[in-house]
Image (spheres, coloured by chain):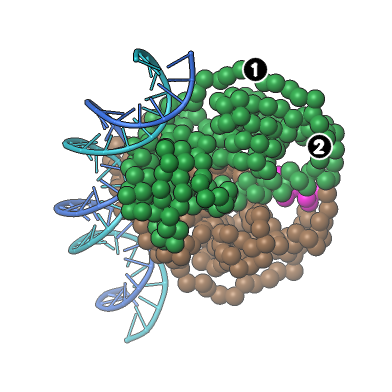
Chain colours: A green, B brown, C cyan, D blue
DNA sequence: CGTGATCTTGACTGATTTCAAGGTAAGTGG
DNA sequence: CCACTTACCTTGAAATCAGTCAAGATCACG
């Protein structure tokens, strides 16, 4: 149940001039290296919202006793960091090299931006509710099957690349890395998926997999 | 894991003239009897938001295979039904006799109302995130201890009344009724709480209980 | 090529569920 | 007012799913 806390934080944040943006006051485009923190848990003021332009980001919450819960994974096009209180309850970290558009909330508050943030929050709420159902009401094989299907649907390519580690998947699904590994092995043994190394897979029997995902 | 679906729906909804309200176009006050549905899952358009004036409400999501997840419990003063899509993903039902202020979202859209709804959504998101952590990262005794503590803190009275059944608690915490019953029994045996019947309890050793809740 | 991180696999353990039975409380009709 | 009914709650025994512990394999990187 104990989860290990992340990789080294590598390299300083590099700011870019911030090219043309869709935000009123022009957000700033920032680049992050794998493992780098975008914002910290319960520390950084939740004054900004973020749009991921390239790469993959993970949000996670670390509990006092070392247990970790991954909140969600975000990919190109997603907004993240839309949180409620004065600080972020979840930290955000880059899984891969990332390009992020950062928007200061109060500095660029227009009705349009407000509406966009509100809509992003609604999406976040819907995803969190879905995640809650996944955590509470499903078995390990079901969780893993749904995880792979979701990812495959999201990218809609033959060969899907996993940007996250087994530990990340485990902390997202409320399982251990050993169970993740076993379920993936079983799915492959039964011909539902085919792995190319540990971080790439292909879906072979979609309908069967969807059935497992119930 | 299979959860039984609710009680009979009793009596028709009784509308009241709708006294003075804080909403622009004046919300309507509606009364519900125990077990009655406020809105249905994936069916009723999510065009209204609700403020609970009296009583207790439960939201729940029913899966195809009969499994049920309780989303949250709401008490006097809480807003609920702030959901994202065109329909409600969770149904809402009265646990006790309830008085609810119903506000039509679009009919009374003012900047003030918009802000209120947005803030209610932020609260909902925060609670859902907290609930997610509870479901994923804790053991049965911890879940039950936290549930009782939260409830006691919420009402801040010596003798707390549980408006929900064991099945509701189980479906909220992702456990079975048997486990709920055993954990409650154990908490009482160890002197952390004292029950008066099945639906009322008193906290005896708060610090000890808080420690269990970790 | 070596080193450390990541991933896989096996055997065992334990928490929670499942299955089954019995008890308690509240409401109903006689 | 009491017997009956039904829903709700509790308790025990057995089974199962996922976790823990431990060892080994693979991968990435210097």
Considering the image in quadrants, where does the C terminus of chain A appear? Answer: bottom left
Residue shown at the point (76%, 46%) measured from the top left: A116
The kind of secondary structure element at disc 2 is loop
Q: Chain of mark 2?
A: A
Q: Is residue B211 visible?
A: no
Considering the image in quadrants, where does the N terminus of chain A appear? Answer: top left
Q: Looking at the image, is B204 positioned above or below residue A7? A: below
Q: Looking at the image, is A212 positioned above or below residue A121? A: below
Q: Is D3 on the left-hand or right-hand side of A124? A: left
Residue that mark 2 sits on: A21
Q: Is A66 on the left-hand or right-hand side of A163? A: left
Residue shown at the point (49%, 52%) measured from the top left: A149
Q: Is residue A177 visible?
A: yes
The kind of secondary structure element at disc 1 is loop
Residue that mark 1 sits on: A12
Q: Looking at the image, is A36 positioned above or below residue B8? A: above
Q: Are marks 2 and 1 in contact (CB under 8 Å)?
A: no
User: Which region is colored magenta?
Assistant: B112-120
Depth order, front residue of B26/B157: B26
């Amino acid at each position: 149940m104990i989860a290990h806390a992340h990789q080294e934080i590598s390299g300083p944040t590099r700011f870019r001039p911030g090219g043309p943006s869709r935000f009123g006051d022009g957000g700033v485009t920032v680049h992050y290296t794998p493992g780098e923190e975008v914002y910290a848990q319960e520390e950084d003021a939740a004054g900004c919202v973020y749009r991921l332009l390239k790469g993959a980001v993970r949000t996670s919450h670390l509990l006092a006793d070392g247990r970790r819960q991954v909140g969600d994974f975000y990919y190109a096009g997603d907004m993240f960091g839309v949180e409620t209180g004065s600080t972020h309850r979840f930290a955000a970290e880059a899984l891969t090299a990332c390009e992020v558009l950062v928007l200061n909330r109060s500095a660029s508050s227009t009705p349009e931006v407000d509406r966009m943030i509100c809509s992003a929050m609604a999406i976040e709420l819907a995803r969190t509710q879905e995640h809650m159902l996944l955590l509470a009401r499903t078995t390990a094989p079901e969780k893993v099957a749904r995880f792979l299907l979701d990812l495959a649907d999201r990218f809609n390519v033959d060969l899907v690349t996993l940007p996250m580690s087994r530990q990340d998947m485990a902390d997202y699904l409320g399982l251990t890395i050993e169970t993740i590994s076993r379920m993936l092995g079983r799915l492959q043994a039964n011909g539902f998926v085919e792995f190319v190394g540990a971080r790439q897979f292909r879906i072979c029997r979609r309908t069967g997999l969807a059935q497992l995902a119930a």
